[in-house]
Image (tube, rainbow, N blue to C red):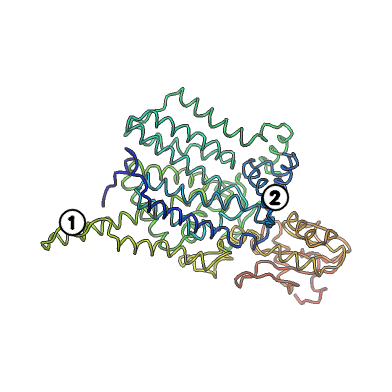
Amino acid sequence: MSRLAELELRGRVAPWQKFEWVIIALLMCAGFWLRARGLSQLGFADDEIHKWLAANRYLQGDFGGDDVEHPMLMKWLIALCIKVGGKLGWAPETMVRAPNVLAGTASIWAVAQLGRRAFGKLAGLWAAGLAAFSTTFIGYQRVGKEDTLLGLFLMLLLWCAAEAKAAADDQDTRAQRRWEYLGAASLGAMMASKYFLFFAPIPLVFYLSVLPQSRWRIRVRRWFWLVAVSFAVFAALNWTPFMPSNWAYGMSYTAGKQTIHGSLLFMGDLFHNLTTHWLAGTPPWFYLVFAAVKLSPLTVVTAAGGLGLAIWMRRPAHRLMLSWMGVWFVILSTAGSKWGRFFTSVLPAFLLLSGYFTAQLLSWWSSRRASSRASDGGSSAAAPFPNFAAVAMATLLLWGAEAQASLRMSPDYRMYINAFGGGDRNVDWFFPHCDYFDAGFREAIAYTAAHAEPNAELSTEIDWVARYYAERSGRPDLLQTLVRRGESCRGDRTCYVVVQTGRYYFINREAVDNLRRLEPWHVETIRGHEVVKVYRLPPGESPFPEKNLARTGVSP
């Protein structure tokens, strides 16, 4: 197995050639197109509607509201898109998701830069191609949540750390300081994207892991200034935490008082999904399963090979990946709350390891081929590395596996389950809440609004989204309730109960199980999967089992 010089994270990295810049530019264009196409074909999810409302409040000078538990940066970007997109006729869904499309496109460049520094240019290009075409990466970078920005700034932070280590070993003090301060700024922007404070130790773990083998040293005074720079960037981008008017809501959210569901359907079973449940919550293997079934089989195999090499060799570049993945998996796997979108901040590590392992495998194959020719009396120079035909074939296989899945699944990228996971038939079994992300709900509300009686009741799990789309359909008269015992369908109105495949919880399980005995009044399907069902109940009829559903004419 060849030992790349880049693995030591020393010296200046080889610059990109013009044709390599062209490849990166083309990958970014392809990645942007895949992320942007059909951006508004899926309606708002519950998380996204709060971003939409908060960004509109920002434009009115109101920085409070119900979304202050999340930092400001993404809402600033959405507000900017509203100002621009409103004049260009963009759909509201497009305005909310556009910042992540752009950040996701920038992530392709960041993967290439980090890959080149850690594993060489070829591995960096392969990883960038995987970032451009990965079905799951694309799908989760199209939703209006903070995880895409978090992942982008985390990659920039790790790239800066790797470059700072290389500059220190090269005794280039000026470059070392520049990269350290850029890393501090990246950390501040990362924290202004999402309050994942436990990601901050990742570069520190890397620093400590390479300390015995490196000249890289950061004095106490420098640490002070790095923290100051990071805090200044954070405060400039995200100053709502310093507003006393928001403290009460923030404390309430931290205590779990704003949680309305608290459970998650995973692999056919229900689990408590609150952080405080720790190992008793959603199982620790959630993200291992996610990695195994949400990337193309070839990406899974090559990433596993790269991880094996990293654990075995443990060179500085490997330690960078292991610090990233180790802290990430230890923290998020032990926490009781887990969501598929969180994986976007560690997914690039798998793509980088995949590109690295493929490059190593090709290097080994080339060396064996050259040795064989030499033993037959030929010259080892007859088989130069990289061999263009071999590189082209590896590129086609590696990128093609992800690209064909992305083209096939568009715009429903998140519904992809690979062959290891049983394919499309298991999309309702693994991660339905995260993968559907309320897809089909907008259409179900539009249909109900077009046919429901005046002043009917609409009982759902996401009343903010239901209210938004009902009003957009010209039906502000529909009474909004949550599917809760003692609240849903209590009056003398016809009641429309909306059941979503992914939103099956402990708190609504009795109602959903009870309604399965009825024929749905309306069903929304995506790729043959029933994702939203609407049940029409007469006045006084409850979706919960204390009412006898046989009165509706359906035999138990």
As rendered, which of 448 and 169 lies closer to the eye?
169
Q: Horizontal and vertical percent for residue 217?
A: 38, 28
Q: Identify which amino acid the numbered label 2 is placed on.
A: Trp
Residue 328 visible in rendering:
yes
Tags 1 and 2 touching, CB below 8 Å: no
Residue that mark 2 sits on: 52
Q: Which amino acid does label 1 sit on?
A: Ala
Describe residue 70's horizontal placement relative to residue 150 as left or right: right
Q: Residue 505 carries which label?
A: none
Secondary structure, mark 1, is helix
Q: Neighbour class for label 2 at 10 Å: few (<14), some, many (≥20)? A: many
Toward the viewer: 525 or 263?
Answer: 525
For disc 1, the marked residue is 381
Report helix, strand or loop for mark 2. helix
Q: Decide if residue 397 is on the left or right side of residue 408.
A: left
Q: In which quarter of the image is residue 251?
A: top right
The image position of residue 139, as x and y in percent, is 55, 58
- Quadrant of the rendered image containing residue 548: bottom right
Residue placed most toward the observer, 257 or 546: 257
Which circle, 1 or 2, is nearer the viewer? 1
Q: Quadrant of the C terminus?
A: bottom right
- Name the residue at 31% across, 34% down: 213
